[in-house]
Image: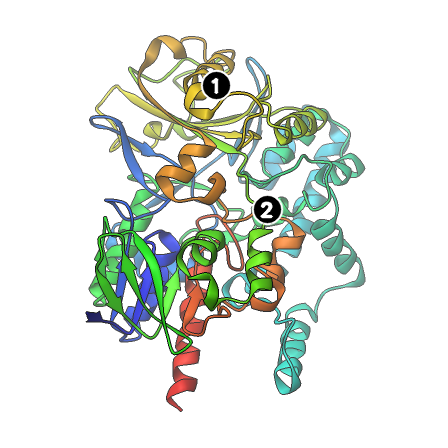
C-alpha cells in the first residue's frame, strides 16, 4: 500500500489546482484520474487526426488571476488571447450585434438599435461591475458558515461586514435582486430594444437550468463580470492557445514540479474508511492507496452516493445530496472543417477574433419557451447555439487552411420523453448544423468530421452526473453557503478526512480554479490545527 499526505480523486482543473497548492506546501500528493488524459471537462481533443478543439469547456473567462499567478501558469505554457468583441450575437442572417470590450464602443454599437439603450448600457455596465467586484473576494475564500457557533460566528459576521461595508443601500437592493430575481424582468426594466436584450441574454450563465424569466436567472450577468485573465480584467473572455486543455496541462506541469504524482486511467472505485475517518482509496483495478486526507474533484452525487459506503454517512446528508438538481441541459458539437465557413454579414478582411465568435440566441420569450420544452423531455425545434471557430485565432489547432469549430447548445433534456440519446445523437447534430447554416450557408459542405456530445455523453465520457457541467445547477438554493448543502459548505464533509474540491463546492462551476484553491487552503488550515 502506497501512502501519501493527500489523495485527489479526479484530475480536472480543480483537482489539479488543489494538488498544485498542496504540493507547493510540501505535501506528498497523488492525483488519480479516470480517463487516459488529465483535464476532466477542460481538455483539448481531436475530432479527426490533426484537428484539435476544446471538446467540452471551450472559452476562458473566469480563470482566477491569483491561481494563474500562484501556480505560474504562463511559465508552463499558458497563453490566452483576449476576445474583442466579447460577444457577437446573430439577430438574423447577416445582422449581428456585438458587445465590444471597450464600453464606449459597445454603447455606440447599441445606439444603432436604441439611443436610450446605449445610455442605459453605460449605467448598467458600471453598476454590474461594481456589484461583481463586491462578490469577487468570496470566490477565493469559503462562503459564510451558516453553522458557525461561538467565536467562529463572530468571526464570520466580521468577515461579512468587512466585505460589504462599502455597499450602499441601493447596491444592497440590486445585489438581492440579482441573486433572487429574473434576468428577463431586469432587462425589461432597463432596456427597450429586443436586440439589446438578446445581447445580455447571450452573456448569461451557460449550462444553467431554467429560462430567463425564472427567479435567480439574473446572477449569470455578475458571474461573467468577475475578473479573469493574466491582467485581472473584469468581464475578461479569451481564446486559450492550444485549446482549453492547455490550462489543465499547465496546472498539471506546475503540480508535478512541486512533487505531485499524477496517474491517469485510474478510476477510483471506493473511498476507504478506518476508525470513522477517510483513510485511502481503492481503484477499479484493485490498487489501494492510503492517505489521511482525501479530496474529491468528482461531483457530490458521484462522491457521496457512489464512492463512500452508505453506512459511513448520515442518512439525512445522503438525502440532501440526492436532492441536488442535476439533469444537465447542455450538449456540444465539435467540427473539423475543410476551411473557414462563409458567414453572412462578415468577410475575410475583418479581425479574426471577430469572425471567430457567433452566438445564435433566441429572444427572451423564445428562450423561456425552449427551456420549458426541454424541462419536459422534448428537444426544442429552435436551439440556443454558441459557436466558436478557434482556429482563426490559434493556428496550432489544425493544418494551414483548415478550420475547427466548437458549438455549445443550451436547453436540452437529459432524459428524453421519447427515444434515447443513443438513437437521437446524430439527429441532434444534423439539427444543429442546419440551424447554423442559416448564418453560414456552406457549413454542411465543409464538414470533414464531427463529434456530437449529448448530455448522456457528458455523463459517460467525462464523469459528469446527469451531464451537469456545474456539478449541480447554479441557482440561489445551490450557491454560496448552500453548496453542496448548508451544513457542509466549507469543503469538509460528514466523513472526517474527506473534502470536496470540485465544482460541486463553492463557488461552483466554470473554469475558475476557485474550488480547488479554496479546498486546498482549507485542508492546509486543518492540517495545521491538527498538528497543534
Vertical order, 289 against 58 (above or below) = below
- Mark 1 — residue? 432
Quadrant of the rendered image containing residue 334: top left
Mark 2 = which residue? 325
Compared across the picture, whether 447 is left or right of 235 comes to left
Residue 252: x and y in percent read 27, 55
> Quick one: 119 or 99, which is closer to the camera?
99
Q: Position of residue 423 (x, y in %)?
A: 43, 19
Q: Secondary structure at mark 1?
A: helix
Query: Which quadrant of the structure image shows residue 135?
Result: bottom right
Q: Are marks 2 and 1 in contact (CB under 8 Å)?
A: no
Residue 326 visible in the displayed image: yes
Which of labels 2 and 1 is toward the front?
2
Q: Residue at x 62, y 64 (%)?
A: 486
Measured as percent of width and height from the top left, residue 60 is found at 43, 44
52 is higher (above) or lower (below) than 94? below
Amino acid at each position: 500500500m502506497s501512502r501519501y499526505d493527500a489523495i485527489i480523486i479526479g484530475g480536472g482543473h480543480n483537482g489539479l489546482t488543489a494538488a498544485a497548492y498542496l504540493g507547493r506546501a510540501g505535501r506528498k500528493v497523488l492525483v488519480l484520474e479516470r480517463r487516459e488524459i488529465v483535464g476532466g471537462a477542460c481538455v483539448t481533443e481531436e475530432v479527426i487526426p490533426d484537428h484539435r478543439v476544446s471538446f467540452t469547456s471551450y472559452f476562458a473567462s473566469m480563470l482566477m488571476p491569483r491561481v494563474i499567478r500562484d501556480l505560474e501558469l504562463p511559465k508552463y505554457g499558458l497563453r490566452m488571447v483576449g476576445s474583442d468583441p466579447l460577444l457577437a450575437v446573430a439577430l438574423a442572417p447577416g445582422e449581428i450585434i456585438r458587445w465590444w470590450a471597450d464600453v464606449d464602443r459597445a454603447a455606440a454599437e447599441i445606439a444603432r438599435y436604441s439611443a436610450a439603450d446605449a445610455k442605459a448600457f453605460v449605467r448598467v455596465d458600471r453598476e454590474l461591475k461594481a456589484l461583481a467586484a463586491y462578490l469577487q473576494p468570496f470566490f477565493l475564500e469559503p462562503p459564510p458558515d451558516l453553522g458557525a457557533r461561538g467565536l467562529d460566528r463572530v468571526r464570520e459576521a466580521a468577515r461579512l461586514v468587512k466585505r460589504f461595508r462599502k455597499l450602499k443601500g441601493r447596491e444592497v437592493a440590486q445585489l438581492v435582486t440579482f441573486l433572487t430575481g429574473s434576468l428577463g424582468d431586469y432587462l425589461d426594466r432597463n432596456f427597450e430594444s429586443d436586440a439589446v436584450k438578446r445581447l445580455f441574454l447571450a452573456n448569461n450563465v451557460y449550462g444553467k437550468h431554467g429560462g430567463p424569466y425564472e427567479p435567480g436567472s439574473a446572477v449569470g450577468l455578475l458571474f461573467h463580470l468577475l475578473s479573469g485573465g493574466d491582467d485581472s480584467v473584469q468581464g475578461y473572455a479569451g481564446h486559450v492557445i492550444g485549446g482549453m486543455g492547455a490550462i489543465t496541462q499547465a496546472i498539471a506541469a506546475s503540480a508535478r514540479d512541486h512533487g505531485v504524482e499524477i496517474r491517469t486511467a485510474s478510476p477510483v472505485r471506493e473511498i476507504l474508511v478506518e476508525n470513522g475517518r477517510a483513510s485511502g482509496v481503492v481503484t477499479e483495478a484493485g490498487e489501494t492507496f492510503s492517505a489521511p486526507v482525501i479530496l474529491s474533484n468528482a461531483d457530490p452525487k458521484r462522491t457521496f452516493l457512489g464512492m463512500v459506503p452508505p453506512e459511513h454517512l448520515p442518512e439525512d446528508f445522503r438525502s440532501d445530496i440526492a436532492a441536488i438538481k442535476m439533469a444537465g441541459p447542455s450538449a456540444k458539437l465539435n467540427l473539423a472543417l475543410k476551411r473557414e465557413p462563409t458567414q453572412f454579414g462578415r468577410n475575410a478582411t475583418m479581425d479574426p477574433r471577430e469572425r471567430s465568435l457567433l452566438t445564435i440566441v433566441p429572444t427572451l420569450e423564445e428562450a423561456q419557451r425552449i427551456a420549458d420544452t426541454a424541462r419536459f423531455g422534448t428537444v426544442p425545434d429552435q436551439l440556443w447555439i454558441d459557436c466558436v471557430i478557434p482556429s482563426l485565432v490559434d493556428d496550432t489547432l489544425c493544418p494551414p487552411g483548415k478550420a475547427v469549430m466548437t458549438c455549445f447548445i443550451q436547453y436540452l433534456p437529459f432524459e428524453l420523453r421519447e427515444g434515447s440519446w443513443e438513437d437521437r445523437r446524430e439527429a441532434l447534430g444534423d439539427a444543429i448544423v442546419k440551424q447554423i447554416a442559416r448564418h453560414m450557408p456552406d457549413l454542411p459542405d465543409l464538414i470533414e468530421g464531427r463529434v456530437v456530445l449529448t448530455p448522456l455523453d457528458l455523463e459517460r465520457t467525462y464523469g459528469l452526473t446527469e451531464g451537469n457541467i456545474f456539478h449541480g445547477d447554479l441557482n440561489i438554493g445551490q450557491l454560496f453557503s448552500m453548496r453542496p448543502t448548508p451544513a457542509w459548505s466549507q469543503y469538509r464533509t460528514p466523513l472526517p478526512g474527506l473534502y470536496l474540491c470540485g465544482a460541486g463546492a463553492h463557488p461552483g462551476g466554470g473554469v475558475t480554479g476557485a474550488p480547488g484553491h479554496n479546498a486546498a487552503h482549507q485542508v492546509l488550515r486543518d492540517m495545521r490545527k491538527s498538528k497543534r
